[in-house]
């Protein structure tokens, strides 16, 4: 979709307009193209309407008044971009979009901090996978021989294994189990994040 930029009679007006619209493009660059175009078109339309109905007002003054009313793109678009990024993340399940969405929404409530912590825990699973490859004898699911309710998931040196009477329960299955756990946990947390967004939309409507 091609959006026609506004053409001004005065060079100063054109420079101000071009600079402002570039700021909008830069601010929305992380969003999908369709969202970028929608936002750009909305701002463009507001400015166009203001210029068309300026009456006897100088073109540049009318443009500056319009831009002042619209406000700084970096500030007024922040909540919208955070919401759009969250929508994109929960639709695609893309980790990059998820982390960007959480970073943008981190100040929008304690629940987003909670989700950030949950996602960080997933890095612990990934770390254990690599640790198991590097040091298979010390990394795993260590279960107490006397009570299966006592266990350690992580790294345990041989001395502690003897001291606490543990054995590594998963063996060669440790890495597959960790991989499956990581993927399932990621999907579950992201679905909960999607549910959270849905609840927010219903409560605000």
Image (cartoon, rainbow, N blue to C red):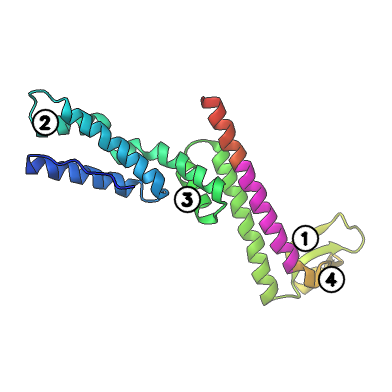
User: Closer to the camera: disc 3 or disc 4?
Assistant: 3
Q: Which residue is mark 3?
A: 100
What label does residue 138 carry, if any?
A: none
Element at label 3: helix
Which residue shows up at 54% across the image and 54% down it?
A: 94
Q: Nearer the viewer, residue 46 or 72?
A: 46
User: Closer to the camera: disc 2 or disc 1?
Assistant: 2
Residues at discs 3 and 1 in contact (Cβ within 8 Å) = no
Q: Which residue is mark 4?
A: 162
User: Closer to the camera: disc 2 or disc 3?
Assistant: 2
The chief SS type of the magenta part is helix
- Residue interval drawn in magenta: 175-193
- Is 188 a magenta residue? yes
Element at label 4: helix
Density class for disc 2 (Cα within 10 Å; few <14, some 14-19, many ≥20) is few
Which residue shows up at 84% across the image and 56% down it?
A: 150
Residues at discs 2 and 4 in contact (Cβ within 8 Å) = no
């Amino acid at each position: 979709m091609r959006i026609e930029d506004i053409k001004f009679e005065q060079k100063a007006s054109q420079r101000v307009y071009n600079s402002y619209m570039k700021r909008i493009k830069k601010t929305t660059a992380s969003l999908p193209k369709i969202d970028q175009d929608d936002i750009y078109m909305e701002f463009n339309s507001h400015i166009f309407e203001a210029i068309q109905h300026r009456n006897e007002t100088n073109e540049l003054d009318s443009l500056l008044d319009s831009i002042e009313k619209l406000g700084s793109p970096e500030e007024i678009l922040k909540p919208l971009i955070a919401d759009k990024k969250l929508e994109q993340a929960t639709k695609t399940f893309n980790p990059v979009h998820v982390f960007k969405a959480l970073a943008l929404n981190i100040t929008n409530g304690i629940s987003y901090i909670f989700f950030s912590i949950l996602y960080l825990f997933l890095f612990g699973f990934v770390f254990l996978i690599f640790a198991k490859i590097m040091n298979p004898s010390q990394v795993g699911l260590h279960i107490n021989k006397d009570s299966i309710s006592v266990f350690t998931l992580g790294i345990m040196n041989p001395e502690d294994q003897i001291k606490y009477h543990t054995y590594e329960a998963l063996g060669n299955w440790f890495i597959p189990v960790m991989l499956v756990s990581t993927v399932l946990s990621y999907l579950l947390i992201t679905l909960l994040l999607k549910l959270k967004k849905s609840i927010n939309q219903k409560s605000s409507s």
